[in-house]
Image (spheres, helix red, strand yellow):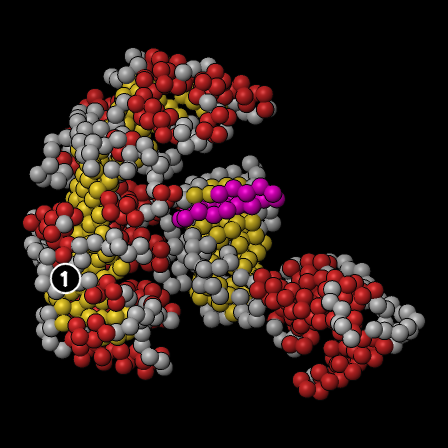
Amino acid sequence: MKQQPINLDEAIRALRDDEAPAGVAEAAAKRVWTRVAHEAGLDRSASDTIRGCADVLALLPAYRSGTLEESRALLVRDHLHECATCHATLQQPVGRRLAVLPWRAANRVAPSQPKSYRREALAAAAVVTLAVLGFGVQRAFFGVPAGSRAAVQSVSGTLQRVAADTTPTLQPGAEMAEAEAVRTAGGSRAHLKLRDGSIVEMGERAELSVSVRGRDTTIHLQRGSIIVQAAKRSSGQLLVASKDVTVAVTGTVFSVNGGLRGSRVSVIEGSVKVRRGRDETTLARGQQWTTSDAMGRVPVRDEIAWSRDVDQHLALLGELQALRQRWGALPAPSLRYESRLLGLLPEGSVVFASVPNYGQTLADGYRLFQERLRESPVLQEWWANADPERHGGPSLGDVIEKVRGFSDYLGNEVVMAAAAPESDRRGPRPFLLAEVRRPGLREFLLAEIARLEEQHGGKAPLMILDDASLASEPESRRKMFVLLRPDLIAISPDLAGLRTLAPAGGGLSGTPFGKRILDAYGEGVGLLFAADLERLGARMRPRDLPPRGIGFEGLRHLIVERKELFGKSHTEAALAFAGPRSGIASWIAAPGPMGTLDFLSPNAQAVAVFLSKAPSQVLDDILSFVGPRNEKALSKLELAELESKLDLRVREDIAETLGGEFAIALDGPLLPTPAWRVVAEVSDPVRLQASLQALVAKAAQEAARAGRPAPQALAEQVGAETFYSISGGGLPVELHYTFADGYLVAAPTRPLVMQALRTRATGDTLGRSAAFLGLFPAGHRDHVSGLVYQNMAGVFGTLMQVFGAATLTDQQRASLEAFTRDAQPTLVCVYGEPEGIQVAGIGGLLNLDPTNLALPMLLERGLPGTARRRVP
């Protein structure tokens, strides 16, 4: 007989419509339970008592504490997922219950009728499949994992577990169960460590509980203040839920204060998402948010002033400073003026990177670290939490020893490269090359391979070849090949690439790209990176290339160098074009004098200044290469239509009124309002001010139509100066500005604008500071096209504001002063050349000085059992 096709929808419908005869369902349930109970050793009478909400509520205390047997816990958990009333009761503090109605599952009794067992089997299989899938989803995203939710790390004063009839005191090491509430007493503090590694510091009289659902962890804050150091996590998120707001975070530091009149969220580091109802707001570092005006706002430093970890932070800061001084005394690898490896690479190489052999330097640095670690209890406490070996990672000492042992066989240079032959359309082939300076490398590698195979119980995907075996070895995508000659080691996953290595020199060094690299060696190199952008661009698909006309189609080479000279780090980068710069690349003007620096003080913490070609020409460039690529978008908002709505001409009334010099700086304290300044060259201040007034007026009209608060523009004469301001209308900050000698000077407050004018009048400016001028790289022009400057010494002032100068001891103040005294400022200069752009600076494009890295590392890691205080 021909079988009919199975229809899943019909099978499910048949199962749904079937009604069990009287007694059949109950008899089947008894048979199943008898078998399961017999095999699992369960007591049927115990589990049979769960018949409704009243039975579930009676079991909740044991369920909360984790002492309920697994069979009954499964039934309770299943009921909680379906019954909102019982689930709400579980979330309430111990001792409080919601009123519940009686509940009992109803059984439908129907007369017996003939059944189709085939339909029942198909329907049952479909339902079981869906149930298994649903159970898997429920376990992954909504399941309640077993185990504790947090552990008490430290207590100052009293920490109590909140229960219905008792409040036992908790000591360090005690653990919290699911939804178990804890509370600090008056004048007490406590640190909790969550199961995901996050740290929660509780202020006095704070009460909270912790629950886990799937991959998410939620801190339920009933009242009081907490500071949370959210651990970085690969999945899920950490939530803090107070009575009127929910905060979602991962890998950041923030505080939540739950008071009688509402909640206040303050971000100390990173960013958080604050949710209230359907509204969501993102807060960045230093920002604050309240659920009501009655709650009020306070400075972030006052919000976290109750934390008692400042002493530990500053002590660790001093230890890292001592380490920095020891590391600074280590000799750096010497500069290299030639490279034999360059000539071995194939002519089609498109990427070249050269680094010195750092093996011995790393070993010496680790030795100094170990010496200081034995001497310092503060470092020992920090390293006990930061050591990667404690978190399942490898031992740092073992890793460095392996690197040093391998590097002892190598020459003074290690080269990483990628080749892309024109005849091969595959991706670039990676190489790692180094000269071999002493025998024994083959034996060393074979011993390491054997060790890896023994540890992992399999064959290591690494094969050592010589020139003879290289020619006959078949290709394999699962192996890393090592070509070992008496004077050379080359590593690559591509056999064909290894066969292209030039045996007798020539290779890449004979190409224009190779000759440009040789020019860099002529002046000595430390770290060197070079890319043949022209050849890389030729291999890209047209759709992956930047739009033509933007100005990047003529790129040729990129060269980046970093080296140590006379105890200072020098960084240079050069971007070369095949012809004159065009499009975006032409916006950087030729080097010239900068007048905006006259409005900035020598104590500025961060400055960026650039010279550009005329803003009207920049606007023309934007319209020229945006129009052809995005005609549909421009049809909706053509420039003429925009100008008609604004009642001004963008090019004539705005672009042509500006000059080609712009500066933005942080010049002053970070609190209570960051002291930023914007200085722009202006060719027609009267027309620009009229345009700004027209824009504010149009914005006010639109706001009035929409029923929103309208922005307003004000002007006030103070002596010979006219000061303007724009505020309201949803603007995040007020804008205050004035015009002075052909420049617009803007800041968030009028006193900051006036201070910039006084700085220029006194002549005590950043542009005339000897310390600032001493940072300019030697051998370059007197003028620049742009610069980026930072001075970490300004952090001292910020920390003084955060912690409060009056609260610092002499030792703490000395630690901060020692840190900032040795922190090195950096300056990066940009030069616009006719057919290229050059970048040079002392201190590097990124300041890698260990002192400047110490503070972020300190604030990121903190100390075990402490809440980290960040700079708002």
- Give residue 80's quadrant in the image: bottom right
Look at the numbered disc 1 and give the secondary structure of its residue.
loop
The kind of secondary structure the magenta stretch mainly shows is strand
Query: Is residue 205 visible in the rendered structure shown here?
Result: no
Percent x, y of residue 544: 37, 44
- Give the residue at x 71% y 58%: 84
288 or 396: nearer the viewer: 396
Percent x, y of residue 40: 67, 84
Q: How many marks?
A: 1
Reply yes or no: does residue 819 show up in magenta.
no
Q: Which residue is mark 1?
A: 502
Characterize the local packing of mark 1: few (<14), some (14-19) or many (20 or more) Cα atoms within 10 angstroms: some
- Give the residue at x 84% y 68%: 18
Amino acid at circle 1:
Ala
| Residue 78 drawn above or below residue 598 | below
Magenta residues (range): 261-282
Q: Answer with left or right where residue 44 lies relative to residue 758.
A: right
Of all residues shown, which one is farthest toward the front?
1
Query: Is residue 129 visible in the rendered structure shown here?
Result: yes
